[in-house]
Image (cartoon, coloured by chain):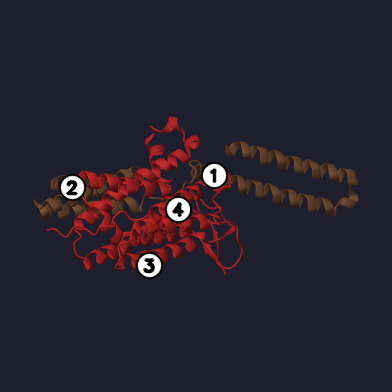
Chain colours: A red, B brown
Amino acid sequence: MRVLIESPYVSVWGHLLPWYGICILIGTGIANAAALREIRLRDGIDVNDFILAEGWGLLGAMIGSKLLYLILSLDEIEWSRMTDPSYFGWYMRGGFVFYGGLAGALLALFAAERLHHLRLRGLLNTVVFAIPLAHGFGRIGCWLTGCCYGIPYSGFGSVVYLKSLTAPNREPLFPVQLLEAVSLFLLSAVLLRISRSRREHNVLAYYILLYSVIRFLLEFLRGDAVRGHWGWLSTSQWISLLFTGACLFGLLLPSQRKVPPSTMM
Amino acid sequence: MSIAALILGIISIVIGVFFSSILGWLGIIVGVLGIILAALGRKSGANEGMATAGLVCSIIGLVLSAILYIACVACAAGASSLTSKAVDDASEAYSRAIDETADAYSSALEESADQLSSEMTEATADYVQSIYDAAGEYVKNAAQ
């Protein structure tokens, strides 16, 4: 069974809308709704803190993912054209790296905690499941657009793009984006389960750990290897290994909080 | 803070509606800043209604700026890939046309091979091949 994807756009009331944007919109909406519902199920979390965290996270993610993209594509940018608004606008539009976004978001949350005197740990543990949920919808958008495409593949479920701006057209490819979307939805369910358990867990660490493993494995099925490569593995795979190591290290360290929280009121 | 949130929200809506093709990224940033300020405004308690209005406007502006703007978030697509894609497709079509012409010519030659000496046939086929190679070179250079 082969899927033919004609266009990354869909015509809605005479306007051409990119599938990718629609998927992100739907995914973000569903993820936010799920996160808000989860917050309401628990006491003690201020919705405004959630909004702050999300705002700062988005800001950090944008800056971080753009920075990493810049670092990875340093020699391909035409610096002399940077002052041209259309070139700069085009540059800002395409090209982000997820791991840069993740790192940027974490740094921004750290800054937000300091700046606004917040404690975000409990909130993060509660809502981090929503991130791979939204991400999964984004991957469906990737599948519809032809970005982050897979290796050449003619078997069941292969996808052929006709007018993709990023994938090789008229060639059957592996739908790695769909596989990643399914993995992310499963990951989200697992994280939600962990966050609801009675013991307190560092759900964020589990997220980064499990995502890194998923990403490392799926990277082998990716066909857009023009992106950063370093030796045998792609940049993303190296970063995945780094994050996996860091998380394992953090999770397996003996807990310093052997003394129960003080009950003095 | 709440007033600032509302102003930023309105600006982000304006950018989203009218300028999202060039300034969409700015609309996203302005929208996010509006959301942050609105949340802070709501927490502080003063002017909570306006802060909430600022929040709603900022979210709408963020969505409007983003949906028409973001091409592909999770890809580190090469900076040149979008512009040269058009050239690649054109050169691919050109190569294919050359290929097909060369094939047609070769098979026509094969059919009339008994009327020409085999050396002539080969020379012509070589000539066609050299045209194809030259076209490929031209296209490769044009794509750079």
Mark 4 and 2 residues: CB-CB less than 8 Å, in contact? Answer: no
Q: Are marks 1 and 3 on the same chain?
A: yes
Is the residue marked by circle 1 packed among few (<14), some (14-19), or many (20+) residues within 10 Å?
some
Pointer 4: what residue? A244
Pointer 1: what residue? A229
Q: CA distance from mark 3 to mark 2?
A: 35 Å
Disc with the residue nearer the chain's start (1 vs 4):
1
> As drawn, is A16 to the left or to the right of B88?
left
Which is more toward the observer, A110 or A91?
A: A110
Return the x and y of residue B112 as percentages of the image width and height.
85, 52
Look at the image and tell me whether residue A173 can be seen: yes
Return the x and y of residue A143 as percentages of the image width and height.
47, 59
Q: CA distance from mark 3 to mark 4?
A: 20 Å
Picture residue at 32% right of the left edge, 62% below the top:
A31
Disc with the residue nearer the chain's start (3 vs 4):
3
Q: Are marks 3 and 4 on the same chain?
A: yes
Q: CA distance from mark 1 to mark 3?
A: 32 Å
Disc 2 marks a residue whose amino acid type is: Ala
